[in-house]
Image (cartoon, coloured by chain):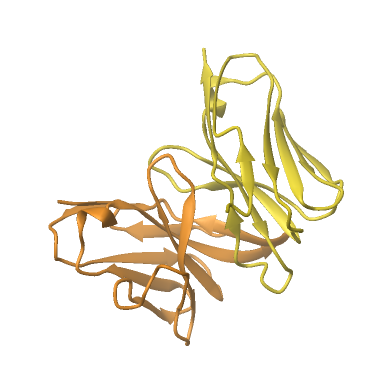
Chain colours: A yellow, B orange
């Protein structure tokens, strides 16, 4: 059983479209992070959310942490080919164990020109 | 944040041999992590390495197969021992840094192919 369910696992859309990636769990997380990974590279941290209901924006990317801190979403507006990559959500179960993360399965996103 | 380098970036090894992967970080950190990743898939944690203590291994990973050293606060090694083709994967190290909560920063990975 996956502790963090990420969906969809694959998504291919046209440039200019909007999309949302979801990360869900039955567990409460003290913090949740989103990463993007490109081929041949390690995951790059995009954002960390720690407060229930928190919304953070990074240019065309909007990240939301659920009120109960069990789920999160990543919304991309007007997707561009440069957004192509593997998106990973990862959560810390407790503040004490915050340094050890649980990862979702990943979403492979392809933006077609 | 932290800048992490890994060596080698890739290698092709024969079955039965061992490979040691090095991970260097540009600042002192308490916790370092080693992950395995199949191409296009998510990350699986192998072990957590604290300086001055034995590494803590996740279920399914054992010290004899994946010995880890952590001699100081900026360096760690992971050895993949007695390799088989099933060990072919990408191996990543990461460090935990206090930012907005604890945040992990990753190295570029080592792509290992076992023939």
Residue at 14% x, 65% y is B16
Position of residue A61 in the picture relative to residue B63 (left or right): right
Say whether residue B31 is visible: yes
- In the image shown, does A39 or B25 lie closer to the viewer? A39
Tell me if residue A12 comes above or below residue A89 in the rendering: above
Tell me if residue B56 comes above or below residue B4 in the rendering: below
- In the image shown, does A82 or B66 lie closer to the viewer? B66
- Quarter of the rendering containing residue A8: top right
Position of residue B63 in the picture relative to residue B99 (left or right): left
Position of residue A95 in the picture relative to residue B18 (left or right): right
- Quarter of the rendering containing residue A74: top right
Say whether residue B111 is visible: no
Q: Position of residue B113 (x, y in %)?
A: 22, 50
Q: Position of residue A58 (x, y in %)?
A: 72, 36
- In the image shown, does A32 or A22 lie closer to the viewer? A22
Residue farthest bottom in this picture:
B52
Q: Position of residue A97 (x, y in %)?
A: 66, 71
Residue at 40% x, 58% y is B5
- In the image shown, does B52 or A110 lie closer to the viewer? A110
Residue at 80% x, 53% y is A69
Residue at 50% x, 57% y is B3
């Amino acid at each position: 059983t996956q502790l963090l369910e990420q969906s969809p696992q694959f998504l291919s859309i046209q440039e200019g479209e909007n999309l949302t990636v979801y990360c869900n769990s039955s567990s409460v997380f003290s913090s949740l992070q989103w990463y993007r990974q490109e081929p041949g590279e390690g995951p790059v941290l995009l954002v960390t959310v720690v407060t229930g209901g928190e919304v953070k924006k990074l240019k065309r990317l909007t990240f939301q942490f659920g009120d109960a801190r069990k789920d999160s979403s990543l919304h991309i507006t007007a997707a561009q080919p440069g957004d192509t990559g593997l998106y990973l959500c990862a959560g810390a179960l407790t503040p004490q164990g915050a340094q050890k993360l649980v990862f979702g399965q990943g979403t492979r996103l392809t933006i077609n020109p | 944040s932290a800048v992490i380098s890994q060596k080698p970036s890739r290698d092709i090894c024969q079955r039965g041999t061992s490979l040691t992967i090095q991970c260097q970080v540009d600042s002192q950190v308490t916790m370092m992590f080693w992950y395995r990743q199949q191409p296009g898939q998510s990350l699986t944690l192998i072990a957590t390495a604290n300086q001055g203590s034995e590494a803590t291994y996740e279920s399914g990973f054992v010290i004899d197969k994946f010995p880890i050293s952590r001699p100081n606060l900026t360096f760690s090694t992971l050895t993949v021992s007695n390799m088989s083709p099933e060990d072919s994967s990408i191996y990543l190290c990461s460090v935990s840094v206090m930012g907005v909560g604890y945040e992990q920063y990753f190295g570029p990975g080592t792509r290992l192919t076992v023939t």
